[in-house]
Image (cartoon, grey):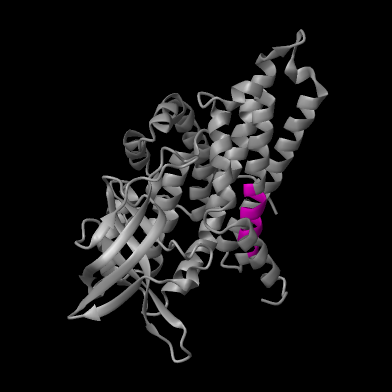
Amino acid sequence: MSYRLSPEHEELRRTVAEFARTEVAPVIGDYYERAAFPYDIVAKMGRMGLFGLPFPEEVGGMGGDYFALCLALEELARVDSSVAITLEAAVSLGAMPIHRFGSPEQQATWLPRLCSGEALGAFGLTEPDGGSDAGATRTTARLDGGQWVIDGTKCFITNSGTAITALVTVTAVTGRRPDGRPEISAIIVPSGTPGLSVGQKYSKVGWSASDTRELVFADCRVPEDHLLGERGRGYAQFLRILDEGRIAIAALAVGLAQGCVDESLRHAGERVAFGRQIGHYQAIQFKIADMAARVHTARLAYYDAAARMLAGEPFKKEAAIAKLVASNAAMDNARDATQIFGGYGFMNEFPVGRFYRDAKILEVGEGTSEIQRMLIARELGLPA
């Protein structure tokens, strides 16, 4: 077993790393402070083919794999997580459901634009009263004259209100099963559909340059053929999407954790205290050593989960482990990096200030740390 990157993957990693350093790092602080969506950066990422990385060439993709996406996310997040989460959500949550479960017509309609980055897709699962309990969906959809009529509210939806958002795929209760449990289906709702109201951007602690909004559906009507996959299989479909997405979020978290190491090493070589560079002091050395160990461990975890997924092997437990370990590493490293920087670490003009603000959501989004532990326990055979 080897975790050395193939020449193709290494070339991609280097290309994205260079892009992050030269195109993202110099400007992202301004976007972040203004809470502005970085359309110019997203357009450049589209021209690079990043939004099409894991999709076949016949639908406009780059013909790569999911691991390639993860490598790109890690390198972007070493510099900024807002840009990284925009890519992650657009690909693994926006376009991937259509690739996995869409009809040929749906794929032909949506995937070329999504793969090019000219349009973004969103994933409408979370609800105000749902949170981790996605099975408690209250949004409903009923058939009326060949149309789905959708009513309900979704919250915390990434990429749902940009000027280039093309669609949101929503989960909704479309009926009841014989045992009384809700039948949950997934439905594609194009942007601008009457009855779909897009809320104002949330004022967030972190990820300030990404787009996150509430969506309200009130007598929102779309054609019956906008059903994604099988009726009643929407919840199961999105569980599969979330399993994959946890690997991508783990890669993003590793990138943030590595960025903390990068910035701390630089600062340790520049900052002088008591007549010496602070990198000479064992307290600083030990902090950075622990940070590097966390990154290495978390990176191996997501590499392993991705390898299992691409090999067609079960990977639910490994994806949960990767997400849990990597998000913990990101939060711990962000805290330690801020401590190493001292007062400067509390200033938004320094990357570690942004890293600290961005890290916490990684322990919450796409499945909280508690949910990851629950999944791991169940996969180990412990009672549900």
User: Residue 171 placed where, x, y %?
Assistant: 38, 69
Q: Is residue 248 magenta?
A: no
Quadrant that contains the N terminus: bottom right
Magenta: predominant secondary structure element?
A: helix
Magenta segment boundaries in residue numbering: 317-327
> 194 or 97: which is nearer to us?
194
User: Would residue 63 appear left or right of 164 to someone viewing this image?
Assistant: right
Residue at 28% x, 78% y is 142
Relative to 325, residue 283 above or below = above
Q: Is residue 55 visible?
A: no
**Number of numbered discs present?**
0
In the picture, residue 341 is in which quadrant?
top right
The quarter in which the C terminus is drawn is bottom right
Going 63% across and 22% down the picture, which residue do you hit? 343
Above/below status of 355 relative to 225? above
In the picture, measured across the screen, residue 217 lies left or right of residue 263, that is left
Q: Nearer the viewer, residue 112 or 148?
A: 148
* Quadrant of the rendered image containing residue 342: top right
Furthest residue to the right? 282
Q: Residue at x 28, y 70 (%)?
A: 150
Q: Residue furthest front?
A: 129
Which quadrant of the structure image shows residue 275?
A: top right
Q: Residue 62 placed where, x, y %? A: 39, 50
Give the camera-side residue of 30 and 94.
30
Is 320 magenta? The answer is: yes
Locate residue 299, reporting x and y percent. Answer: 64, 46
**Nearest the eye: 250 or 196:** 196
Residue 142 in sight: yes
The residue positioned 67% from the left and 15% from the top of the image is 271
